[in-house]
Image (cartoon, grey):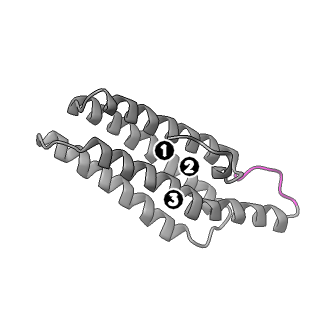
Amino acid sequence: MEWYDDYNIDVDLIDTQHQELVRVVTRLQEALSSGPVNTEIASALKFLVQYTQQHFHDEEEIMRAIRFEELEHHQKLHSKLIDEIKDILLAIKKGKGVNAYDLIDFLTDWLINHIRYEDKKIGRAMEQYKNETSDWDGSLA
């Protein structure tokens, strides 16, 4: 998986976190290519869940601060992804194999499509918020 500049939404914190998520998925992809070892997959997925939860929290705080109209919808998308990854972790814990290619395809598609079609809306809303807030000092507190 590769990062492209057109994935940027022009919100520094979110863009930095998205780039790290791409790196995490890439590392997971590399680990899986060396052979499907469920403990390695589970460990990588656990880290991904933890990092993703922090990222979603930060992203949702920004959305609240700029009064993003689609916050509730966006939160549901976030929750659904976390639930799906937790289901994969549970399957691994129960001894079920995970198809590495399907897992990587799922994570890559979700991340890229989410950034390009959902998170870009945050960038546009942030730009509008800045333009409408005449005394904006650059902070969201």
> Element type at marker 3?
helix
Q: Amino acid at mark 2?
A: Asp
Residue in the image at 84% along x and 65% along y: 131
Work out whether 44 lies above or below 137. above
Q: Amino acid at mark 3?
A: Asn
Residue in the image at 30% along x and 49% along y: 102
Lateral position of residue 67 relative to residue 21, left or right: right
- The answer to which image quadrant residue 135 occupies is bottom right
Range of residues picked out in magenta: 135-141
State how far apart marks 3 and 2 are (Cα).
19 Å
Q: Position of residue 22 (x, y in %)?
A: 51, 41
Q: Which residue is mark 3?
A: 113
* Labels 3, 1: front one: 3
Q: Which residue is mark 1?
A: 54
CB atoms of marks 3 and 1 within 8 Å: no
- Circle nearer the N terminus (3, 2): 2
- Dot 1, how many residues are within 10 Å of its Cα: few (below 14), some (14-19), or many (20+)? few
Work out whether 51 lies above or below 69. above
Q: Which residue is mark 2?
A: 58
Residue in the image at 47% along x and 63% along y: 75
Of residues 94 and 108, the one nearer the viewer is: 108
Of residues 69 and 33, the one nearer the viewer is: 33
